[in-house]
Structure formats: C-alpha cells, structure tokens
Amino acid sequence: MTTNSIYAQLVKTGDAWSAAYGPFVLRSALQPIFKRVADGVFDIHAFQGLVRAERNGEAYPPSQFFSLVAPEDLPAVDSLLRSIHILNAGLMQRERTLVLVSFQPQLFTDGVELRHELDRIRLAAHEARLAPERIVCDVSAGSSNGKVLARTIEQLRRAGLRISMSNYEASEHDIQDVLALRPDFVRFDGDWVREYLHNSAGFALLRVIVRQLQDEGIEPIFERLEETWQVDLCLDLGVTLLQGYALARPQIAPTAFNDEFPEMLLPPSEPATAPAAQSQAQPQPPSPAAQRREPGLRPPRVFGKRR
C-alpha cells in the first residue's frame, strides 16, 4: 500500500467514513475533550480520533493491530487513520470544535515526505470543511530525537495546523522542552496525574505547572479522568480542558455527541475564544471547591447549547 493510493482505501457508508487495510476494517472512535466555559458549564472543545480495527468481525486493540502492520505500510496507515478521523469529525458539522489526531514524526523524517503528508492533511480538512487551524496534530514527547521533533512541529505550524504534545511528565527537563517547542496544548499523562492528585505536595506541584504553561499560552489537557472527584480537583487546579470516562466515553462514528452535547451558541458579537464573556449569560453555580464544602449544593454539570 502506498500513500499515493491512500484515498482508494476510504469508504463512506451512511454517515461515517471507514477504511480498509488488508483484511482489516478501520473505523474512527471519537472521544470529546471538554472545555469549562463557566463554573459547572462545559462545551466540547475537541474530538480525539482513536482507531477501532476489526478483522472478520473480531476487534483488535490498537497495540495488537499496529504490531500486524508491515513496517513499510506504517506511514500510509498512519495517514489513512488521520484522514478518516478528520472526515468523520467534519460530518458532525460543528462550527468550532477541533479535531485531535496522532502524528508520528519518526514516520516522516524526509522533508519531501513530510510536505506531502501535510498536503494530505489539508486535503482531508478541506473535504471535511474544516479550517486547518481546527486540526490538532498530537506528537509524543518521546517519539523521536529533539531535532526531528522540533523540525516537524515547525512544519506543522507553517501548514496552519495546531500542535499538542502527549506522554508529558513534568520534570524540569520536560518543562523546558515544552517551553522551547511551544505547542498549543500539552496532554498530561493520566496515570501520572492521578498519582499527583492523591497528595497535597503533588497537587501543589501540578498547580504551579498548570499556571506556568498557561502563562506561556500553552493549554494543559488532563486526560483519562475516570472519577468525578478527579474532575473536580482538576477544576480546582485551574485546568479548563478535560477528558475521560467521567465525562464521556469514546463512540464509533457516526456518534450521538451532537444530541448528547449540542454545541453552545455564542452571542453574535462574541468571538469563539472568549468563554469568560459567556459566563455572564447565566447565574454562576458554586465553584467545585465550595461544592465539596457543602455537598448538598453540588449542581449537575451543564452541557450543550446556551441560549
């Protein structure tokens, strides 16, 4: 399989795109990343694309599927999966929601190959009617050497795409690397975060790191939050972008997210990047900290359109 013939592998059935790789059927599962726009009020800020592979009706976990992909096919499969995630997110016809897709720099070390892949991403975004800045390419902090990573991020940025970094752990070395590369988002490792949330010293360290990144214009994403108390502690840290089963599980496209979490309607005079102004549109529920002090006052979280 070559990237030149990649779009021959795409199939649109009903309201979803899928793809084929040999005997495998590849589908998109989309999981929301929520943004807190006011106390207790959340909107879907992005969808993360996750592969769901099956062969003869049998599901294969991603780790098992990728181990069966021929090494020479990995770049094409990687590109194919990005395409179906972007196309499926576009079918939802949301006006502002971003799409987060994995990007592996080590698969595109040649400059010409990288430029061709960026063209394919822009083509998929055009077909999905998504502006390039709504595509977030997620690169692993340890995926390749520093020079390759820096060059890839610079090319992604020049193509008009946004960047997130994953597998991040907040050592002093990691923090300096992130500040030098200046991604738009940093995804905190879920297991690492949960360990730090369990003690006061770790919680204080997380608060400092979150504030440091936000001061530099880098938005932290705390992921794999499985319990509501973890969500509440992250909100107390000042984190505004949250993901995990405690909020919403992934769904295979076509999803029901438009019905479950309708996109919020912003006032015509307000830009999409001004959530603080939106908070004036309705009364503020008590903060998560206040809710923990008075459990009886805890309101349900609000998702969906604000009128």
Image (cartoon, rainbow, N blue to C red):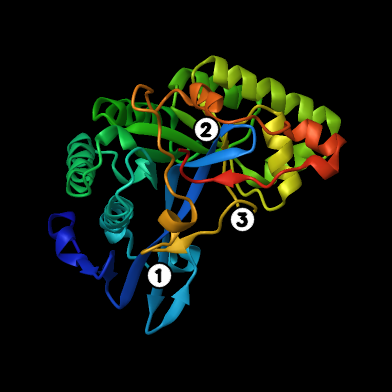
How many residues crowd around disc 1 within 10 Å: few (fewer than 14), some, or many (20 or more)?
A: many
The residue under label 2 is 186
Label disc, if present, on residue 304 of the rendered structure: none
Earlier along the polypeptide chain: callout 1 or callout 3? Answer: 1
- Residue 66 is situated, as x and y percent measured from the top left of the image, at 41, 63
- For badge 2, the amino acid type reads Val
Q: Residue at x 21, y 34 (%)?
A: 111
- Residue 46 is situated, as x and y percent measured from the top left of the image, at 43, 42
Element on which disc 2 rests: strand
- Residue 131 is situated, as x and y percent measured from the top left of the image, at 24, 36
The residue under label 3 is 245
Left or right: where does residue 115 sit relative to residue 210? Answer: left
Mark whose residue sits in front, 2 or 3: 3
Check the image and name the residue furthest to the top: 215
Q: Nearer the viewer, residue 291 or 229?
A: 291
Label disc, if present, on residue 53 of the rendered structure: 1
Real-space CA distance between mark 1 and mark 3, rounded to the nearest whole angstrom: 21 Å
Left or right: where does residue 35 sit relative to residue 55? Answer: right
Q: Residue at x 42, y 66 (%)?
A: 52
Mark whose residue sits in front, 1 or 3: 3
Q: Residue at x 19, y 46 (%)?
A: 120
On the question of residue 72 being in view, the answer is no
Element on which disc 3 rests: loop
- Residue 183 is situated, as x and y percent measured from the top left of the image, at 44, 27
Indicate the quadrant where residue 215 lies.
top right
- For badge 3, the amino acid type reads Tyr
On the question of residue 247 being in view, the answer is yes
Quadrant in which the C terminus appears: top left
How many residues crowd around disc 3 within 10 Å: few (fewer than 14), some, or many (20 or more)?
A: some
Earlier along the polypeptide chain: callout 2 or callout 1? Answer: 1
How many residues crowd around disc 2 within 10 Å: few (fewer than 14), some, or many (20 or more)?
A: many
Q: Nearer the viewer, residue 157 or 64?
A: 157
